[in-house]
Every structure is written in structure tokens, then in C-alpha cells.
Image: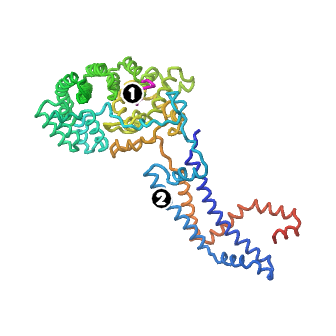
């Protein structure tokens, strides 16, 4: 089991500080008793030898219970201030300040070695380096199934008064549009120059006005794209605009294809025109899918993937998988998975959970947890359970949405793989496919939580994938709207130091209050507690006194 450097480093220091505090109080109390006892043993002539100790005894004897109340109350106040600061720091940064300082500064001074490096020897890429944490795991991706702003996102806003998209998400989309739909030579074509400025506009009405201005000059494919995405209020209107964009985009693509080898400027134009054409065809296929023409959508997606096989950044195969599942064409779904569910290709929730759905479909209609517990799992059931565990390890947020334990919202335009945003995007479109397979959700409900027993520390060690990235919560909070409660995995538990400080603060405050209100009763309780605590020691001392000669014991006492 991987070590927990924060916990192991901090709790001994906290425990030592607390024990030292109570030991000092106890030593003061015991020293007072010992000095009083010595005053009875020491004769008057020899008392001068202990003048300093007598003065200390007088000082300690003058201490009233109020001193101990003040001392206890002060420690309680300090503990409370530390607790409040730790709680605030933990809520803001997700880690304990004391733990962070201990690991970063105290551990190197004490010669500690960080042994928390994850060991990924069991990952699907068997020869991968065990201590490599892929930065791309926290990369934000364009949602392959993103909705239309005008026809879907804006309609949601009109009905509910809520904004389904965050500023961060829309800013990422603006950057994507500038990357895909503009190039350095746009100034050579007046309409493209206008659209280059339009994609940078923050105001939606300014963008729409700029698109109409560009269309007054010539048929501009990117202007039609902007109007279809943001001005069209229905999918039918959006499809009409995309068809006009397709006509203009194909003309630009053919012209730039003939000139692409004449220089870098023409090559950049051709690359831009290719991106525009692929985007238009993909959105047209999505319009067909939304309007119920699913077979037509599948044909358009297949043709697009065959015509542009290298443009995998659009993840058109995920659109194809969803459409094939709608047609219940599971053989073709399996064929697509065989091509894209490969070790060398990046995974997604769509790939992993669709593979799990197909394996669950073979056994889910007859699956019974009671029967399985009696006779054990068959080979097919074991394969289905392993596929579910694999999918849950990749993205543990999805099952709660599929099982309707959490409410769905509109998916964002960008997703974070293995994050809550990807889970929402997957469940929003694929929940109906799981419901259509009899018993699939029941099998998922019975088996998905078993994944977490295989990876008790997912941030440090994975099973089939790399350790779960720690950046998902922060990125998802930027991508998802404020009214949505972001799903967090693994659940962050309060650090030991905060819990210990809270207990210490409450305990000392209670002692201070009781001592102030009932000093005599607390004194009796303290004496009874100490006498009970030291009963074994007194018993041993009595046995020692009975064994040793009285003269020797007297000499030891004088020493």
C-alpha cells in the first residue's frame, strides 16, 4: 500500500506537541506536591541549601485555579485559531497548510525520502514508466457532441433564466474558432477579414452583426457557421444555414486544394478550408441525428471519416458510436470499438462505457445478484464485470448519472477526460441506450462500487490506467455552471491535523469552562482521575518500599 507522506509526517508532530502540553501541566502539579512533601522532610538548618527551590515552591503555591483555567483557555483559543485557519486553507486549496509545510520543509530536513511515487506496473501500457504522470490527462477537449448555442443552450436560458455555459468554456470555444476558422492570409479576402474580428468578439450580437456584414460582401462559409451556431433558434434553421455554409465551403476547399503547393500561405489557407469543411459536414450529420434521420447521419459520418481519416481531433467516431447505438446496430458498434479502443489511442468515457455496455448486454437480461452469489460468476459475467470496472476506473463519475443518483444538466462545450464534465456529456446522450438494454443498469448498480476496492488510493496508483489526475476538480469547476454540484473523486477527507485540533480545542475549552464554573468539583474529579491513573505506580512503589530496607529508601529520598 502506498505511503501517505502528509499523514505520516504531520501526526507525530501534532501528537508530540499535545502530549508535551499536558505533560508540562502535569509536571507543574507534581512538582508542587513534591516540594510540599520535601518541606516536611528537610530540617530547618538544611533549608538554606534549597533557597532557590523554596522560592520556586512559594511561587507555585501562589498559583490559583484561575491560572490553570487561563492556561487551558489560552491553549484552547490558540487551537481554535489554528483550526479556523486550517479549515479555510483546506476549503480554498484542497490541502492542509501544516501538512504541506511539513512535507515540503520539515521532511527534507529530517532526511525523509518521498516514497509516494506511484507504481504503474499494472497499467494497460505495460512498458510505461511507473512514475510518469501524463500532463495530457488534464487537457481540456472539445466535446464531440456539443449542443448548438442558439437552438439549445439559449433556449434553456430563455426557459430557466440560467446560463448553462461558463465564461471559461465559451472563451475556450472562441480560441478553437480562431484556430480552426482563421489563418494569416485572411486579410486577402474581405469577408474572412471581418470574420477574423468577429470570432474575437465577446458580445454575441456583435458577432452576429459581423457575420451578416461578411455575407453582404460574399458567400462566406464561416459566417454561415456562426449564424447557424448562435442565431438559429431551431435545429431546422441551423441545418439550412449549414447547407449554405457547405456550398460555400466546398468551393473554397476546391480552390485552395489546387493552390496548396504554391507556398506556405496557400497551404495555410487549404488547412483552414479543410477544417471548415469537416466542421460543417460533422454539424450537418449531427443535425440529421437530432431530427431523427439517424441512418442518414451514420452515412454522413462514415463518409467523413473515410474522406478525412487523419482528422481524429474532431473525435467523429464518438458521434458515430452514439448514432449506431440509437439504431441498435451493435455489430457495427463492436467494429468501431475494435478500431478505436486501442492501447495507443487516447481513451474516453464513450469508448470505455460503450465497451462495457456491449459486454453487459450479453448477460444482463438474466443476471441476478442472488444467483451469482450462490453459483459464482460465469465467464461472460466476469468479462462484463471487468469491463464495468475498467470503465469506472477511467471515469468514476459516470455511474451516478446513469443510475440517476445525480441530476443531469446540459453538457458543456468542452470536457475534461476522466472528469465530471465528461461524465455529464456521456450520460446526457447515452443514458437512453443503457435503459434500452434490459438489466444493464441493474448489473452496473450491483458491480460498479467494487472498482474502488481495487484502487484504494487512486491518486497514487492505478490498476488499468494511470493514477487518477488531481486536477479534475479545479478544471471541472471552471467548465461547469455554478448551480451544478461538481462530483469530486476521490472524496476529500478532512486532514488528521484539522480533526485532532478540533478535538483538542473542544476538550480544552470544556475543561476551562467546567473548572471556572465548578472549581471544587473539578478538583475532586482531577484528584480521583490522577489517583486512578497512578494507582499502578503507587502499587509498585509500595512493593518496592516493602522489599527495600527503610534506611536505604530514606537515603534515596534524601538524594
**Which quadrant of the view contains residue 75?**
bottom right
Left or right: residue 215 versus residue 319 is: left
Residue 434, numbered label: 1
Left or right: residue 67 versus residue 190 is: right
Say how the picture is coloured: rainbow
The residue located at (55%, 41%) in the rendering is 116
Secondary structure state at the residue bearing disc 1: helix
**Which quadrant of the view contains residue 394?**
top left
Relative depth, front residue between 120 and 287: 120
Residue 511 locus on image (x, y percent): 58, 65
Left or right: residue 298 versus residue 14 is: left
Relative depth, front residue between 556 and 360: 556
Q: Is 280 located above or below residue 56 in the figure?
A: above
Secondary structure state at the residue bearing disc 2: helix
Point out the residue furthest to the bottom here: 45
Residue 84, numbered label: 2
Residue 42 locus on image (x, y percent): 79, 77
Point out the residue furthest to the left here: 216
Q: Which residues are magenta?
A: 341-348
Is residue 464 visible to us here?
yes
Amino acid at each position: 500500500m502506498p505511503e501517505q507522506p502528509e499523514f505520516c509526517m504531520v501526526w507525530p508532530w501534532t501528537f508530540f506537541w499535545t502530549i508535551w502540553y499536558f505533560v508540562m501541566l502535569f509536571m507543574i502539579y507534581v512538582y508542587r506536591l513534591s516540594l510540599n512533601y520535601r518541606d516536611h522532610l528537610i530540617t530547618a538548618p538544611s533549608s538554606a541549601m534549597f533557597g532557590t527551590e523554596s522560592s520556586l515552591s512559594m511561587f507555585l503555591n501562589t498559583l490559583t485555579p484561575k491560572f490553570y483555567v487561563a492556561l487551558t483557555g489560552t491553549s484552547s483559543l490558540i487551537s481554535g485559531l489554528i483550526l479556523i485557519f486550517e479549515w479555510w486553507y483546506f476549503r480554498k486549496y484542497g490541502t492542509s497548510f501544516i501538512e504541506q509545510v511539513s512535507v515540503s520543509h520539515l521532511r527534507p530536513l529530517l532526511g525523509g525520502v518521498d516514497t509516494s511515487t506511484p507504481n504503474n506496473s499494472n497499467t494497460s501500457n505495460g512498458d510505461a514508466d511507473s512514475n510518469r504522470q501524463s500532463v495530457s490527462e488534464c487537457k481540456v477537449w472539445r466535446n464531440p457532441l456539443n449542443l448548438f448555442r442558439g437552438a439549445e443552450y439559449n433556449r434553456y436560458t430563455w426557459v430557466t433564466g440560467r446560463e448553462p455555459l461558463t465564461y471559461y468554456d465559451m472563451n475556450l470555444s472562441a480560441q478553437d474558432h480562431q484556430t480552426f476558422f482563421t489563418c494569416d492570409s485572411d486579410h486577402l479576402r474581405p469577408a474572412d477579414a471581418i470574420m477574423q474580428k468577429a470570432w474575437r468578439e465577446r458580445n454575441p450580437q456583435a458577432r452576429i452583426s459581423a457575420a451578416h456584414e461578411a455575407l453582404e460582401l460574399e458567400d462566406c462559409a464561416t459566417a454561415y457557421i456562426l449564424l447557424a451556431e448562435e442565431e438559429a433558434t431551431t435545429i431546422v434553421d441551423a441545418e439550412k444555414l449549414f447547407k449554405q455554409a457547405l456550398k460555400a465551403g466546398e468551393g473554397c476547399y476546391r480552390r485552395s486544394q489546387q493552390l496548396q503547393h504554391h507556398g506556405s500561405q496557400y497551404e495555410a489557407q487549404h488547412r483552414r478550408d479543410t477544417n471548415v469543411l469537416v466542421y460543417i459536414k460533422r454539424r450537418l450529420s449531427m443535425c440529421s441525428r437530432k431530427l431523427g434521420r439517424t441512418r442518414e447521419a451514420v452515412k454522413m459520418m462514415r463518409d467523413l471519416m473515410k474522406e478525412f481519416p487523419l482528422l481524429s481531433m474532431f473525435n467523429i467516431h464518438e458521434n458515430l458510436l452514439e448514432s449506431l447505438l440509437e439504431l441498435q446496430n451493435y455489430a457495427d458498434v463492436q467494429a468501431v470499438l475494435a478500431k478505436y479502443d486501442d492501447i495507443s489511442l487516447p481513451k474516453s468515457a464513450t469508448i470505455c462505457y460503450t465497451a462495457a455496455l456491449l459486454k453487459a448486454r450479453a448477460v444482463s437480461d438474466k443476471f441476478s445478484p442472488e444467483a451469482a452469489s450462490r453459483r459464482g460468476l460465469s465467464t461472460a459475467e466476469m468479462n462484463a464485470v471487468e469491463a464495468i470496472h475498467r470503465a469506472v476506473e477511467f471515469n468514476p463519475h459516470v455511474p451516478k448519472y446513469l443510475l440517476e443518483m445525480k441530476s443531469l444538466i446540459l453538457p458543456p462545450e468542452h470536457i475534461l477526460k476522466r472528469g465530471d464534465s465528461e461524465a455529464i456529456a456521456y450520460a446526457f446522450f447515452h443514458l437512453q441506450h443503457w435503459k434500452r438494454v434490459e438489466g444493464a443498469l441493474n448489473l452496473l448498480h450491483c458491480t460498479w462500487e467494487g472498482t474502488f476496492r481495487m484502487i484504494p488510493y487512486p491518486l497514487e496508483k492505478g490498476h488499468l490506467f494511470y493514477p487518477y489526475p488531481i486536477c479534475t476538480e479545479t478544471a471541472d469547476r471552471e467548465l461547469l455552471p455554478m448551480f451544478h454540484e461538481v462530483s469530486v473523486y476521490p472524496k476529500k477527507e478532512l486532514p488528521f491535523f484539522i480533526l485532532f485540533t478540533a478535538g483538542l480545542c473542544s476538550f480544552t475549552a470544556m475543561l476551562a469552562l467546567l473548572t471556572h464554573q465548578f472549581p471544587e468539583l473539578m478538583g475532586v474529579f482531577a484528584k480521583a482521575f490522577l489517583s486512578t491513573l497512578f494507582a499502578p505506580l503507587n502499587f509498585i512503589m509500595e512493593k518496592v518500599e516493602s522489599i527495600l530496607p527503610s534506611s536505604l529508601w530514606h537515603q534515596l529520598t534524601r538524594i
